[in-house]
Amino acid sequence: MEHPTLSWEAMQDGSVFYRRHQLYSIPGKLPGDLQDFIIAGCRYGGPIALMRDTSRLVALGAATPVFSKAQIQVYSPAGEGLLLFSWDQAKIIRFGWTGDERLVVLNEEGVYRIYDLQGEYQQFSLGSDAGETGIIDARIHETGLVALTGSLTFLEVKEWTGGKPLALANPGLSQPPQSWTVIPPDQTISRHVEVLLSVDATIYSVDNLESLDQRISRGPFTHMAPSPNGKSLALLTFSGLLWVVSTDFQRSLAEFNTTSVAGAEGDVLQVEWCGNDAVLVTWKHLAVLVGPFGDTLQYFYSGSTFTVTEPDGIRIIGPDTCDFLQKVPASSVSVFRPGSTSPSAILFDAYENFSKRSPKADESIRSIRPDLAAAVDECIDAAAREWEPYWQRRLLSAAKFGRSFLDLYDPTDFVHVGQALKVLNAVRFYEIGIPLSYAQYTQLSPSHLISRLLARNLHLLALRISSYLSLPPDAVLKHWACAKILRSKPSASGSGKNAELDGDDALCKVIVEKFEQLGGRGVSYADIAKRAWEVGRTALATKLLDHETKASDQVPLLLSMQEDKLALMKAVESGDTDLVYHVLLHLQKRLSLGSFFRLIEEGGPRLALASRLLQVYAREQNRDMLRDFYYSDDRRVESAVLCLEDAANSSDPAAKITSVKAAQKFFSEDKDRSFEAKMMDESVRLLTFQQQLEKEADGKIAFFGLSVNETIRACLVNGMSKRADKLKSDFKVPDKRFWYVKLQALTAIRDFEGLEAFARSKRSPIGYEAFVKHLVEKGHPKEAAAYVARCDGPKRADLYILCGDWRAAAKECKDRGDKAKLEQLKKSAPNSLIARELEQAATSMK
């Protein structure tokens, strides 16, 4: 294995080194000359997309036949074909990659599609205005795009959710810019996208608030490229001058005349950044790396190249190879630089001597003992930055050797780097084709890498990596299940529907068993069932939902699938009333009332809770629906009670009578409710009679809604005694009750003569004691005393006392010869005068 330094090349007087590492050998794997294609590369070791450049003439037979039509082909960095699809829309303006490896293709009508690596896409639009004016150019970055419309204004799309595009500030262009670029939001101070336009000799900076002229005079520029961190900008003028400047245009960082490069032929193809420290300028057969101080390194290729900027370097895709050019990391320089005396270099040398059983190893370790921990850390970091597994193992072994001489050392970094390298070596393999560096891997996170493997349907590798890194397998299992559903077909063991059911049962069993075997407890079966439903496997979706433990996830999907009864049953079984209400209201909107009620009725006892909740809701919010529900369920008594509630709440007489009549009708239809039906009939008669009374009184007296007793009393109070008598006879009011009501009414209007006449009209069915007590209670003791004589003898004395007539009470005792009663009265006399009179009456009895 050749030494790492053999691929190093020095810049800045040997203080900085760059290395070009061949990632893959790809002779003949990519179609034709890359110069004849429009290409978009995905960062972080992602794929490249190619489309024939129709503006270039190509010799017949030179191009691959599959590119004769408007097609886009996607290759991995190892040259393996990942995807091929035809384009059937308007002319493509631009295509590029999102941060999660999806390909965005934008056409001139403002329609853009987002493709995954399986060829499935979502389609969105920039709006009708963009469609009318047309799109003439665009720039696509990882989190959005900026489009230049035919009216020379800019539209921005944030995220990839199909949101409404936002208009940026109008720069007032009269013609398209000579070149332009975009600095993504995560690299600007304002956290908003910034567009840089080369207009004549200056540059305009445009964001969502303003368009600012930077007032420079070195333009126009043919190429513009921001650095990965967004702090620097590489500009190439028409005269071939490469100018590197800060993105705020306050500092000029470097200048280089590209016309002085020997061997450069034709126009510059690309100007791209190699990390954040150097710029790579490419021609057809040549790539020149320009350092901060104008130093250059040249790399030759047999044909056209395409470069993709990475955070820590640059990928160069040529006709035969895919290379990665990067600045040699400081830890690698420290260990491997010839003549290095750093502790890490000495530690590595000590390990080499130890491997050869040389005693020099002990001397070397002793010499760096104070810096041994730092040397171990640097060897670990250098191992992480190496591409060849041979040197990774040697460096980690050196770190392990040095660690054995340390009393206290935290091995966490050592373990993490070892795990990371094992994962990286697996995904760098040419059949996988994701050449991530360690720096990129730490920026992305392992979960992001797993999602990229899943996008390629590499489920087994993703699962092994998840297990190896102790990550939950949920995301892998979910994607695997969805992919399996998409690829599988119902078995043909049966015929027609039976065949589909057999296939669904088997597939559902496979998925459930795999989840239980691999511990996918966090996977939502509802998400997988939704995918099954989307591809037309409704029966499979229903079976999968039976294994979903969360009703809140089950029910919405069942509603979408129009499995209404099952959705309602699951909601009821969950015991969540809010969820039941959600289903009920959804079904009420979607179904006819008849179908809605039938669904609940057919559920029987299992849907009893839903039925009760519907009644509670309807009673408060929609009484008409409750009435219909009772009617459809043949619930006569509940319907009648509802009518009576309506009658009680109604202020309109006609409506009240109609409601009571309806209640009478419902009661009459139930043979066990004949009494209630009769009561309703009498209630209607009473209300009708009360209406007549109000008409006779010209509406001055309110009768409507009163009870029979209250109506009789109102008639008596208002001098309508004949009407009161008619009410008594019509409604068979008992004599006792009628006398009580008339007594109270005549007392209330102080008609004592009428009361006397009424008392003499016939023998009182309630006696006369009631007269006395009621009159006294209402404050008429004098009038009450007149009725005491008609009461029973033994009670008269007490009744006289109640009326306050002590003399009459004494006389009554004397007449009756009741001396004991008289003595009792004497003891309770209110004053001495009355007591003396009572004493005289008692003496006279002797």
Image (cartoon, rainbow, N blue to C red):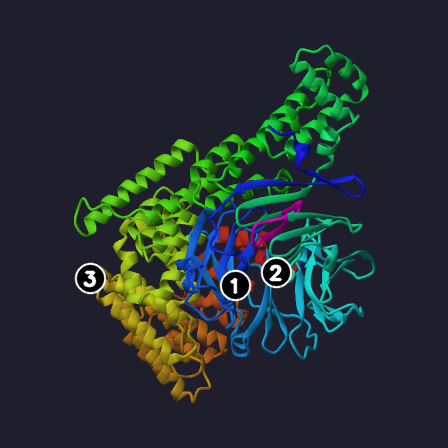
What is the distance, in whole Å, between disc 2 and disc 1 at their CAs?
Answer: 104 Å
Residue at the (65%, 15%) spot, across then down? 355
Q: Position of residue 591 (x, y in %)?
A: 32, 65
Determine whether 53 is above or below 186 in the image: below
Q: Identify the residue under disc 3.
A: 671
Q: Name the amino acid type tagged 2.
A: Ile
Q: Nearer the viewer, residue 717 or 668?
A: 668
Q: Position of residue 299 (x, y in %)?
A: 65, 47
**Dot 2 alpha-carbon crowd within 10 angstroms: few under 14, some 14 to 19, many 20 or more:** some
| 1 vs 3, front mark | 1
Residue bounds of the magenta highlight: 300-314
Q: Identify the residue under disc 2.
A: 834
Residue 740 bears which disc, if any?
none
Counting residues from the start of the chain, the first of labels 3 and 2 encountered is: 3
Q: Name the amino acid type tagged 3.
A: Lys
User: Is label 3 in a helix, a strand or a loop?
Assistant: helix
Q: Quick check: can you spot residue 206?
A: no
User: Is label 2 in a helix, a strand or a loop?
Assistant: helix
Q: Nearer the viewer, residue 595 or 783?
A: 595
Determine whether 835 is above or below 744 in the image: above
Residue 162 bears which disc, if any?
1
* In magenta stretch: residue 308: yes
Residue at the (58%, 40%) spot, across then down? 22
Kindly check if marks 2 and 1 are in contact, taking CB atoms under 8 A apart as contact.
Answer: no
Q: Position of residue 347 (x, y in %)?
A: 73, 21
Residue at the (48%, 67%) spot, across then down? 774
Q: Name the amino acid type tagged 1.
A: Gly
